[in-house]
Image (cartoon, grey):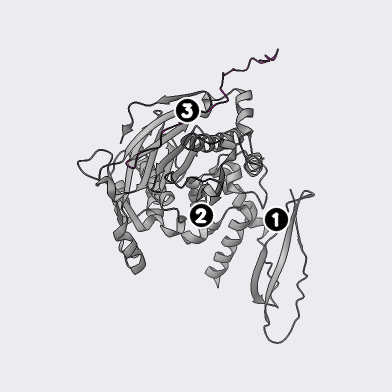
């Protein structure tokens, strides 16, 4: 280990092996997150950059500023190492593609794993937290936001412009502006998570065409209700009958709201989503977060 | 900072008694401070030949867009933002992009349909959509 005479860099011992992981069950979502502030070791970051494809590296370099570059690097590293651990493959060997609407997914073309259940993932990040959700068999969408994030516009004006009428009603009766802002943000993460789980792009589910409301009596349970605008399309109506969506909203690292949305697998018998949260530094350590704070 | 716009096909405005409508497909390169942005895309504009309206967004519009973007993302005034700069390159996430759209709507007095607003990824694209909507509004 080289110690610069001018700056002492934080050294994190890391392994070159990645311990494998057991796949989530059908009723689970695994949520992994990295806190960029905990990853400072330059040799570790260099190791991460060696996992990325040339295209990924180029995209990282396009970003303006060291923090953005580092976070983009960590995001790709989290995706590659996490999926590689579930599938016991070299993280460098994974290939990715986008569905026809631009949602990233794994390209399993290279592998002979007809026995392996299809893994789904989705990623979200803020400047201080990077998260990756993983499910099997069903699509997943996640969104994370810093709890303290300030909205530059008036919250109600924003909601009136973009959210559904029912959601605006709900927000407008909250007297405390801080509480209102937090509820607005929680709704944002839930709505984003849904659109990302759907994977058909923003225009397939404009925010004002659906309402997400909490199920009374169930902590952490939310319902998705579509406004008649969507139901008017007979094709959507048929689809709507067949698919249900499960939501989970939690607090991560005391600093972020995280919303998870996954398609309800009828086999799970309508049970609520079970979320297993782990904080990680790839190649260094995992920490199971024993209490996932449901909101 | 000056942005010079060069078109590879010259628009020959033939002055005639009647309005001639024509369709233009052209490749555009944006130069900025001597550095080629290599931003090339096809523009299809259908307009009366006797109107000298440029297909690309006005410098003024682009500057206003840059200002709004910088404000939303809390970037310093001297942060370099060019026509081809992607919002994501500056660190904008989806919530930022929506707030940027709101800021642009307020500034220009327009409403962007969500599908169109989502297509905006760069300053140039935002400015062009704005001008199109402003034109529709005043038409």
Mark 2 and mark 1: Cα distance apart in space:
25 Å
Magenta stretch: dominant SS? Answer: loop
- Magenta-span inclusion, residue A192: no
Residue at the spot 30% in from the left edge and 64% down from the top edge = A228
Q: Nearer the viewer, residue A125 or A139?
A: A139
Q: Residue furthest top?
A: A5
Q: Residue furthest left?
A: A217
Q: Residues within 10 Å of mark 1 (few under 14, many from 20)?
A: few
Q: Which residue is mark 1?
A: B39
Number of numbered labels in the structure image: 3
Q: Is residue B110 above or below residue A256?
A: below
| Residue A258 pos. (x, y %) | 39, 38
Q: Chain of mark 2?
A: A
Which numbered marker is on residue A99? 2
Task: Identify the element where label 1 is drawn.
Answer: loop
- Are the residues at dot 2 and dot 1 in contact (C-beta closer than 8 Å)? no
| Residue A79 pos. (x, y %) | 51, 38
Q: Which residue is mark 3?
A: A280
């Amino acid at each position: 280990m080289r110690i610069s005479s001018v700056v002492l860099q934080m050294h994190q011992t890391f392994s070159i092996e990645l311990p494998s992981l057991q796949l989530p069950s059908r009723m689970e979502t695994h949520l992994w997150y990295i806190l960029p502030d905990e990853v400072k070791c330059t040799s570790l970051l260099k190791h991460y950059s060696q996992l990325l494809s040339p295209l990924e590296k180029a995209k990282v370099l396009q970003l303006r500023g060291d923090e953005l570059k580092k976070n983009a690097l960590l995001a790709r590293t989290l995706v590659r190492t996490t999926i590689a651990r579930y599938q016991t493959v070299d993280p460098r060997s994974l290939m990715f593609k986008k569905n026809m609407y631009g949602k990233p997914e794994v390209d399993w073309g290279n592998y002979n794993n007809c026995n392996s259940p299809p893994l789904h993932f989705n990623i979200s990040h803020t400047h201080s937290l990077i998260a990756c959700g993983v499910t099997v068999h069903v699509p997943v969408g996640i969104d994370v936001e810093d709890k303290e994030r300030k909205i530059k516009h008036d919250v109600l004006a924003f909601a009136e412009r973009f959210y559904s009428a029912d959601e605006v009603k709900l927000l407008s009766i909250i007297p405390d502006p801080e509480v209102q802002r937090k509820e607005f943000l929680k709704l944002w993460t839930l709505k984003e998570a849904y659109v990302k789980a759907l994977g058909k792009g923003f225009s397939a589910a404009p925010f004002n065409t659906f309402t997400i409301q909490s199920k009374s009596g169930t902590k952490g349970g939310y319902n998705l209700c579509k406004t008649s605008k969507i139901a008017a399309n007979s094709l959507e109506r048929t689809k709507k009958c067949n698919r249900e969506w499960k939501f989970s909203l939690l607090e991560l690292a005391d600093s972020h709201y995280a919303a998870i949305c996954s398609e309800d697998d009828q086999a799970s018998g309508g049970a609520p989503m079970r979320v297993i949260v782990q904080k990680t530094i790839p190649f260094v350590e995992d920490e199971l977060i024993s209490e996932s704070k449901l909101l | 900072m000056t942005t010079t716009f060069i078109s590879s096909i010259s628009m020959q405005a033939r002055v005639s008694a009647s309005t001639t409508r024509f369709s233009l497909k052209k490749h555009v390169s944006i130069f900025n401070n001597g550095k080629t942005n290599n931003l090339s895309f096809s523009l299809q504009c259908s307009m009366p030949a006797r109107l000298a309206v440029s297909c690309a967004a006005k410098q003024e519009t682009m500057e206003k867009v840059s200002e709004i973007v910088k404000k939303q993302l809390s970037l310093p005034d001297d942060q370099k933002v060019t026509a081809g700069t992607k919002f994501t390159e500056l660190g904008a996430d989806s919530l930022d992009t929506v707030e940027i759209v709101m800021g642009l709507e307020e500034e220009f007095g327009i409403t962007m349909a969500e599908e169109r607003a989502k297509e905006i990824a760069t300053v140039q694209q935002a400015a062009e959509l704005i001008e199109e909507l402003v034109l529709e509004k005043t038409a």
